[in-house]
Image (cartoon, rainbow, N blue to C red):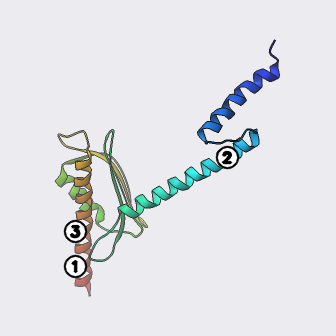
């Protein structure tokens, strides 16, 4: 007959063995397995953070005119394109140029969130008309159109500032 204690230990032991195999631990005691798993999780977190930093660095783009830093990410998703754009400074009028670029692409925006108060943040989901499936080629087209819109905005903004002087 199996005791209540053994019935409680069996699931815990099974979970510890699973944890041990996932974390590639060679330990045998509960404490050591948990410590190894904790180190493994910390290592994974560090790797994820490094990958995020690399991704931000690779997508951070500066326009050639004024070294205007923009974080831009365009991905193909199940529902079309997911576009995320962020600048640390306020960009009066940039949204107009972005929306014009969407129109020129024939991009139907299904959902969007924009903040233009202290910085500029755009998150949008959309599809290109007559092409509901987004692929990597289309992602590059959308990304280039966004960068061109930023460049156009930057040039117009500079011209306006020069006219004020």
Between 62 and 109, the one nearer to me in the picture: 62
* Residue 135: image location, x then y, percent: 26, 44
At x 26%, y 72%, the residue is 154
**On the picture, is 34 further left or further right than 160?**
right
Between 115 and 128, the one nearer to me in the picture: 128
Q: Label 3's element?
A: helix
**On the picture, is 71 further left or further right than 156?**
right
The residue positioned farthest toward the front in the image shown: 26
Q: Which residue is mark 2?
A: 36
Residue 59, image quadrant: bottom left
Marks 3 and 2, Cα distance to the nearest angstrom? 53 Å
Q: Which residue is mark 1?
A: 159
* Residue 98: image location, x then y, percent: 26, 59
At x 26%, y 63%, the residue is 147
At x 66%, y 33%, the residue is 17
Q: Which residue is mark 3?
A: 152
Q: Residues within 10 Å of mark 1 (few under 14, many from 20)?
A: few
* Residue 126: image location, x then y, percent: 28, 45
From the viewer's perspective, is the residue at label 1 or at label 2 nearer?
A: 2
The residue positioned farthest toward the bottom in the image shown: 165
Q: Is residue 123 above or below residue 28?
A: below
């Amino acid at each position: 007959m199996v005791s209540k204690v053994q019935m409680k230990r069996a699931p815990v032991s099974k979970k510890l063995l699973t944890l041990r195999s996932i974390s590639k631990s060679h330990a045998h005691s509960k404490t050591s397995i948990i410590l190894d798993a904790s180190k493994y999780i910390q290592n994974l977190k560090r790797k994820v953070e490094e990958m995020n930093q690399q991704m931000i660095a690779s997508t951070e783009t500066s326009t050639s005119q004024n070294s205007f830093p923009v974080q831009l990410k365009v991905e193909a998703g199940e529902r079309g394109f997911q576009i995320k754009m962020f600048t640390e400074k306020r960009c009066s009028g940039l949204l107009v140029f972005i929306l014009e670029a969407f129109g020129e692409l024939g991009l139907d925006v299904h959902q969007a969130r924009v903040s233009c108060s202290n910085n500029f943040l755009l998150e949008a989901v959309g599809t290109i008309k007559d092409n509901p499936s987004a692929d990597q080629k289309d992602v590059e087209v959308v990304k280039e159109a966004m960068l061109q819109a930023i460049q156009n905005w930057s040039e117009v903004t500079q011209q306006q500032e020069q006219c004020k002087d």
